Image (cartoon, helix red, strand yellow):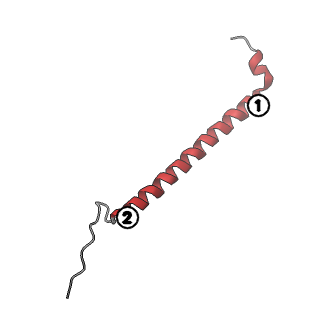
Amino acid sequence: MSEPVPTKLTDNGMTPEQDAAFRKQRRRRSLALAGALILFALTFYVLTIIKMGPALFDRAL
């Protein structure tokens, strides 16, 4: 009988294909989180400018 060829595993116990898929999924999740954080900060910035109104630009520097 022939024995199955063992699959080479990475340090975390996954095959290279699984590891690549995991890294791709983690990168997408990180980019989505970064985008959400940027959108959140931008929303607060815009709302602050709107709340201050046109008087913001009439003050002395």
Helix, strand, or loop for circle 2?
Answer: helix
- Residue 34 percent across, percent down from the top left: 54, 45
Q: Picture quarter containing residue 5?
A: bottom left
- The numbered dot on residue 19 is none
User: Crowdedness of circle 1 by 10 Å Cα count: few (<14), some, many (20+)?
Assistant: few
Tell me if residue 28 comes above or below residue 9 in the rendering.
above
Name the residue located 75 percent from the left edge and 21 percent from the top edge.
56
- Residue 43 percent across, percent down from the top left: 68, 39
The residue pinned by badge 2 equals 17
Name the residue located 77 percent from the left edge and 31 percent from the top edge.
51
User: Crowdedness of circle 2 by 10 Å Cα count: few (<14), some, many (20+)?
Assistant: few
Name the residue located 39 percent from the left edge and 65 percent from the top edge.
18
Q: Picture quarter containing residue 47?
A: top right
The residue pinned by badge 1 equals 50
Check the image and name the residue furthest to the right: 54
- Three-letter code, disc 1: Ile
